[in-house]
Image (cartoon, grey):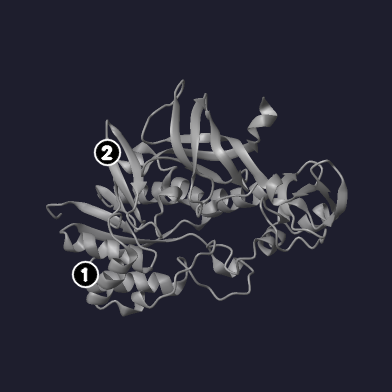
Amino acid sequence: MSKHGRVLVAMSGGIDSSVAAVMLHEQGYEVIGMTMKTWDYASAGGSKKETGCCSLDSINDARTVAVNLGFPHYILDIREEFGDYVINHFTGEYLEGRTPNPCVLCNTHIKWDSLLRRADKLDCEWIATGHYANLRHENDRYFISKGIDENKDQSYALWGVSQQSLSRTMLPLGNLRKTQIREMAAERGFMDLVNKSESYEICFVPDNDYRGFLKRRVPDLQERVNGGEFVLEDGTVVGKHEGYPFYTIGQRKGLGITLGYPVFVTEIRKDSNQVVLGTIDKLARDGMWAGKLNMMKYADLTGRTLETVTKVRYNDDGTSAAITQVGDRMQVLFHEGVNAIAPGQAAVFYEGNDVVGGGWILSSFRQEATL
């Protein structure tokens, strides 16, 4: 055991997690690498070649780094629990007319828990990942804060990690920029990682075709939902669609309908198999409710209104909003309209760079309609 302690590093085979492992190794920690096998591409049914964090190439890339630096590397097979939780949830959310965020769910309920269980078996005090985010500890609370590289910041994806998990987590890349990470890898001779392309797809939908994935996952789905109605907000029927699970809030392209002016999906009505269309001004909402909260910076906000910047999707810049906790839900009142608030996505509340907490979007509304 080194004087700094033993740390289990989640290594996807990409440049970020590899450099995180290198940094900790050079700082004197006893590093153990762990690559998680979450998905079996042979059962995906897609047309694209196996790529991403679960491919054999990525596993070998992670192992090469470990071998070159002389620390152990293991493969952790979590396909069963990943399928039971993340993939079933992904499918179920679309069938409920919501838009899921499997990466957040995987981080909070699969990867961290799996890593910590294995860390205990390997006598590791810490776990570490290659996320671009910082971790702070103040007033007996652990919370995520934005990474300094605004273009790579991944704090949004970590809002659901528990206090107990954060207390044993290290995020070595939070104060580095992507350009620095590439330079560090190049200086150490890991040019394959420097030249490796990055994947932004959902790992178990390798061809990025979630419609095809749903049809393969639920064989009779298309015949069950085909022929639903496109309607306007006032109920006017304007056409037929392929089935409500195949559309998302804010979608414009691929609707297969022409009304003579641009329209977007503004609402999905599962029970009636209706997809509501509207112009861009009908897409905006200035209020929403979020549930299944995980509070970070503050343990509880009941009876208190806090000014925040709230993000409703990963690539959202965020919008100023007043949040108020009501029981196990959060009411969010935006100070201006926000387009395409999709139930099922994650809402993350920021105070400056700090993550106050987050939750899953339940519904959205227009404030004047509630008066």
The three-letter amino acid code for the residue at tag 1 is Gly
The three-letter amino acid code for the residue at tag 2 is His
Judging depth in this view, the residue of 273 and 321 nearest the camera is: 321
Identify which residue is drawn at 61% across, 47% down: 339
Residue 285, horizontal then vertical, whole percent: 63, 40
Judging depth in this view, the residue of 320 and 180 nearest the camera is: 320
Identify which residue is drawn at 31% across, 62% down: 177
Residue 144, horizontal then vertical, whole percent: 35, 44
Around disc 2, counting alpha carbons within 10 Å, would you say few (fewer than 14), some (14 to 19), or many (20 or more)? Answer: few
- When asked about the image quadrant of residue 234, the answer is top right
In the displayed orientation, state which residue is furthest to the left: 3
Around disc 1, counting alpha carbons within 10 Å, would you say few (fewer than 14), some (14 to 19), or many (20 or more)? Answer: few
Query: Mark 2 highlights which residue?
Result: 137
Identify which residue is drawn at 43% across, 26% down: 301
Judging depth in this view, the residue of 265 and 242 nearest the camera is: 265
Number of numbered discs on residues = 2
Query: Mark 1 highlights which residue?
Result: 70
Image quarter in which the C terminus is found: top right
Image quarter in which the N terminus is found: bottom left
Element on which disc 1 rests: loop
